[in-house]
Amino acid sequence: MIQAGAAAGQPTEILDPGTQTKIATFNLARLALITLVLFSTIFLRQEVFGEAVVLKIYSVLLASFTLSLLSATLWKQTLRVRLYIPSQLFYDLLLTSYLVFLTGLNESIFLFLYLLNIVFASVVYQLNGALFVSAVSGTVYAMIYYVNTDLENTAAIYNLAYNELLFLLTALLCGQLMDELKRQKILLERSEEHTSELQSLAYLVC
Protein backbone atom coordinates (compact mmCIF):
# COMPACT_ATOMS: atom_id res chain seq x y z
CA MET A 1 0.00 0.00 0.00
CA ILE A 2 2.79 2.39 0.91
CA GLN A 3 6.08 2.56 -0.93
CA ALA A 4 9.20 4.50 -0.08
CA GLY A 5 10.24 7.33 -2.40
CA ALA A 6 13.17 6.53 -4.62
CA ALA A 7 14.85 9.88 -4.71
CA ALA A 8 15.87 12.28 -1.99
CA GLY A 9 13.61 15.25 -1.66
CA GLN A 10 10.60 13.29 -2.93
CA PRO A 11 7.64 12.32 -0.71
CA THR A 12 8.67 9.37 1.43
CA GLU A 13 5.24 7.76 1.35
CA ILE A 14 3.09 7.31 -1.74
CA LEU A 15 -0.26 5.59 -1.65
CA ASP A 16 -1.21 3.22 -4.44
CA PRO A 17 -3.98 4.31 -6.87
CA GLY A 18 -6.53 1.96 -5.33
CA THR A 19 -6.04 3.44 -1.87
CA GLN A 20 -6.12 6.97 -3.27
CA THR A 21 -9.46 6.23 -4.93
CA LYS A 22 -10.88 4.88 -1.67
CA ILE A 23 -9.73 7.95 0.25
CA ALA A 24 -11.12 10.29 -2.42
CA THR A 25 -14.51 8.54 -2.44
CA PHE A 26 -14.65 8.40 1.35
CA ASN A 27 -13.64 12.04 1.74
CA LEU A 28 -16.14 13.36 -0.79
CA ALA A 29 -18.93 11.24 0.69
CA ARG A 30 -18.17 12.58 4.18
CA LEU A 31 -18.09 16.16 2.91
CA ALA A 32 -21.44 15.74 1.13
CA LEU A 33 -23.00 14.08 4.18
CA ILE A 34 -21.80 16.72 6.65
CA THR A 35 -22.99 19.44 4.28
CA LEU A 36 -26.43 17.83 4.13
CA VAL A 37 -26.59 17.42 7.90
CA LEU A 38 -25.39 20.99 8.44
CA PHE A 39 -28.16 22.38 6.24
CA SER A 40 -30.74 20.11 7.87
CA THR A 41 -29.99 21.63 11.26
CA ILE A 42 -31.63 24.83 10.03
CA PHE A 43 -34.94 23.13 10.74
CA LEU A 44 -34.08 22.32 14.34
CA ARG A 45 -36.54 23.99 16.68
CA GLN A 46 -34.88 25.93 19.46
CA GLU A 47 -37.99 25.73 21.61
CA VAL A 48 -37.67 21.92 21.59
CA PHE A 49 -33.93 21.47 22.12
CA GLY A 50 -33.07 24.84 23.62
CA GLU A 51 -30.86 27.56 22.21
CA ALA A 52 -27.72 26.28 23.95
CA VAL A 53 -28.10 22.77 22.47
CA VAL A 54 -28.75 24.09 18.97
CA LEU A 55 -25.66 26.31 19.17
CA LYS A 56 -23.54 23.31 20.22
CA ILE A 57 -24.87 21.32 17.27
CA TYR A 58 -24.11 24.16 14.87
CA SER A 59 -20.60 24.50 16.31
CA VAL A 60 -19.56 20.85 16.02
CA LEU A 61 -21.07 20.45 12.56
CA LEU A 62 -19.43 23.62 11.29
CA ALA A 63 -16.08 22.48 12.69
CA SER A 64 -16.50 19.07 11.04
CA PHE A 65 -17.46 20.69 7.74
CA THR A 66 -14.37 22.93 7.88
CA LEU A 67 -12.05 19.99 8.60
CA SER A 68 -13.55 17.94 5.76
CA LEU A 69 -13.25 20.87 3.37
CA LEU A 70 -9.61 21.38 4.34
CA SER A 71 -8.77 17.71 3.81
CA ALA A 72 -10.41 17.87 0.37
CA THR A 73 -8.60 21.09 -0.53
CA LEU A 74 -5.20 19.92 0.74
CA TRP A 75 -5.48 16.64 -1.16
CA LYS A 76 -1.76 15.85 -1.50
CA GLN A 77 -1.19 16.40 2.20
CA THR A 78 -4.22 14.27 3.04
CA LEU A 79 -2.80 11.35 1.08
CA ARG A 80 0.30 11.38 3.29
CA VAL A 81 -1.69 11.02 6.50
CA ARG A 82 -1.34 7.47 7.75
CA LEU A 83 -4.52 5.74 8.94
CA TYR A 84 -6.60 8.59 7.52
CA ILE A 85 -9.79 6.57 6.98
CA PRO A 86 -9.73 4.76 10.37
CA SER A 87 -9.18 8.06 12.16
CA GLN A 88 -12.07 9.64 10.26
CA LEU A 89 -14.36 6.70 11.03
CA PHE A 90 -13.48 7.04 14.71
CA TYR A 91 -14.11 10.79 14.60
CA ASP A 92 -17.47 10.25 12.85
CA LEU A 93 -18.45 7.78 15.57
CA LEU A 94 -17.68 10.32 18.29
CA LEU A 95 -19.47 13.08 16.37
CA THR A 96 -22.57 10.95 15.84
CA SER A 97 -22.68 9.88 19.48
CA TYR A 98 -22.36 13.48 20.65
CA LEU A 99 -25.15 14.66 18.35
CA VAL A 100 -27.42 11.80 19.42
CA PHE A 101 -26.69 12.57 23.06
CA LEU A 102 -27.58 16.25 22.57
CA THR A 103 -30.83 15.67 20.70
CA GLY A 104 -32.17 12.70 22.64
CA LEU A 105 -31.64 8.98 22.25
CA ASN A 106 -35.01 7.76 21.07
CA GLU A 107 -36.11 10.47 18.67
CA SER A 108 -32.79 11.94 17.55
CA ILE A 109 -32.69 13.06 13.92
CA PHE A 110 -29.01 12.11 13.88
CA LEU A 111 -29.43 8.43 14.77
CA PHE A 112 -29.21 7.47 11.08
CA LEU A 113 -25.59 8.66 11.04
CA TYR A 114 -24.59 5.48 12.85
CA LEU A 115 -25.90 3.50 9.88
CA LEU A 116 -24.08 5.69 7.37
CA ASN A 117 -20.83 5.23 9.27
CA ILE A 118 -21.31 1.47 8.97
CA VAL A 119 -22.02 1.81 5.24
CA PHE A 120 -18.86 3.88 4.76
CA ALA A 121 -16.83 1.24 6.60
CA SER A 122 -18.27 -1.52 4.41
CA VAL A 123 -17.31 0.35 1.24
CA VAL A 124 -13.70 0.69 2.37
CA TYR A 125 -13.13 -2.45 4.46
CA GLN A 126 -15.98 -4.74 3.34
CA LEU A 127 -17.66 -7.12 5.83
CA ASN A 128 -14.99 -7.17 8.55
CA GLY A 129 -14.79 -3.39 8.69
CA ALA A 130 -18.57 -3.03 8.72
CA LEU A 131 -18.95 -5.53 11.56
CA PHE A 132 -16.21 -3.84 13.58
CA VAL A 133 -17.72 -0.36 13.21
CA SER A 134 -21.16 -1.81 13.95
CA ALA A 135 -19.88 -3.41 17.16
CA VAL A 136 -18.14 -0.23 18.32
CA SER A 137 -21.16 1.91 17.41
CA GLY A 138 -23.49 -0.46 19.23
CA THR A 139 -21.28 -0.45 22.31
CA VAL A 140 -21.02 3.35 22.48
CA TYR A 141 -24.73 3.76 21.83
CA ALA A 142 -25.59 1.21 24.52
CA MET A 143 -23.40 3.05 27.04
CA ILE A 144 -25.11 6.37 26.28
CA TYR A 145 -28.48 4.64 26.42
CA TYR A 146 -27.70 3.02 29.76
CA VAL A 147 -26.66 6.32 31.34
CA ASN A 148 -29.66 8.28 30.09
CA THR A 149 -32.51 5.75 30.09
CA ASP A 150 -34.38 3.77 32.70
CA LEU A 151 -33.77 0.18 31.61
CA GLU A 152 -36.38 -1.10 34.05
CA ASN A 153 -38.88 -0.02 31.40
CA THR A 154 -39.48 -2.93 29.03
CA ALA A 155 -40.14 -0.62 26.10
CA ALA A 156 -36.72 1.00 26.58
CA ILE A 157 -35.00 -2.38 26.43
CA TYR A 158 -36.89 -3.32 23.26
CA ASN A 159 -35.93 0.00 21.69
CA LEU A 160 -32.25 -0.54 22.50
CA ALA A 161 -32.37 -4.10 21.15
CA TYR A 162 -34.07 -2.88 17.97
CA ASN A 163 -31.37 -0.30 17.28
CA GLU A 164 -28.56 -2.74 18.05
CA LEU A 165 -30.12 -5.27 15.66
CA LEU A 166 -30.44 -2.56 13.02
CA PHE A 167 -26.72 -1.80 13.32
CA LEU A 168 -25.85 -5.49 12.93
CA LEU A 169 -28.15 -6.10 9.96
CA THR A 170 -26.82 -3.01 8.17
CA ALA A 171 -23.26 -4.27 8.65
CA LEU A 172 -24.11 -7.77 7.43
CA LEU A 173 -26.03 -6.64 4.35
CA CYS A 174 -23.64 -3.90 3.24
CA GLY A 175 -20.52 -5.86 4.18
CA GLN A 176 -21.56 -8.97 2.28
CA LEU A 177 -22.54 -6.86 -0.72
CA MET A 178 -19.14 -5.15 -0.76
CA ASP A 179 -17.38 -8.51 -0.32
CA GLU A 180 -19.26 -9.90 -3.32
CA LEU A 181 -18.48 -6.82 -5.42
CA LYS A 182 -14.81 -7.13 -4.54
CA ARG A 183 -14.84 -10.83 -5.45
CA GLN A 184 -16.52 -10.12 -8.78
CA LYS A 185 -13.98 -7.38 -9.50
CA ILE A 186 -11.10 -9.78 -8.87
CA LEU A 187 -12.68 -12.42 -11.10
CA LEU A 188 -13.20 -9.84 -13.85
CA GLU A 189 -9.58 -8.70 -13.65
CA ARG A 190 -8.36 -12.30 -13.84
CA SER A 191 -10.64 -12.95 -16.79
CA GLU A 192 -9.28 -9.90 -18.60
CA GLU A 193 -5.71 -11.03 -17.92
CA HIS A 194 -6.52 -14.53 -19.22
CA THR A 195 -8.15 -13.09 -22.34
CA SER A 196 -5.13 -10.87 -22.95
CA GLU A 197 -2.79 -13.88 -22.64
CA LEU A 198 -4.90 -15.87 -25.11
CA GLN A 199 -4.87 -12.99 -27.58
CA SER A 200 -1.09 -12.71 -27.29
CA LEU A 201 -0.70 -16.45 -27.82
CA ALA A 202 -3.01 -16.39 -30.84
CA TYR A 203 -1.00 -13.49 -32.29
CA LEU A 204 2.23 -15.46 -31.93
CA VAL A 205 0.74 -18.59 -33.49
CA CYS A 206 -0.63 -16.68 -36.44
Image (cartoon, rainbow, N blue to C red):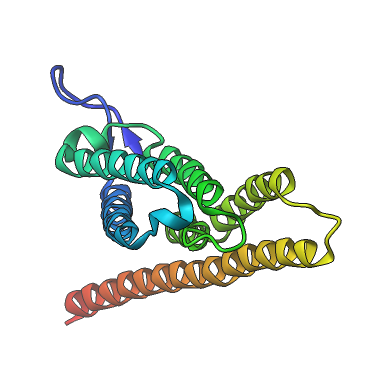
Viewer-proximal residue, 132 or 180?
A: 132
Q: Position of residue 156 (x, y in %)?
A: 76, 62
- Quadrant where the image shows the C terminus: bottom left
Which corner quadrant of the image does residue 165 belong to? bottom right
Q: Position of residue 113 (x, y in %)?
A: 47, 58
The answer to whether residue 33 is left or right of residue 126 is: left
Q: Position of residue 94 (x, y in %)?
A: 50, 41
Q: Spot the residue most to the front.
A: 47
Residue visible at 24% across and 40% down?
Answer: 66
Residue visible at 70% across and 68% down?
Answer: 162
Residue visible at 30% across and 38% down?
Answer: 63
Q: Position of residue 135 (x, y in %)?
A: 65, 52
Viewer-proximal residue, 22 or 201?
A: 22
Q: Spot the residue most to the top.
A: 8
Viewer-proximal residue, 149 or 193?
A: 149
Q: Is residue 19 depicted above or below 4 in this figure? A: below
Which corner quadrant of the image does residue 166 belong to? bottom right
Tally of marks: 0
Residue visible at 44% across and 72% down?
Answer: 181
- Quadrant where the image shows the N terminus: top left
Q: Is residue 112 depicted above or below 64 in this figure? A: below
The answer to whether residue 129 is left or right of residue 191 is: right
Q: Is residue 170 depicted above or below 79 in this figure? A: below
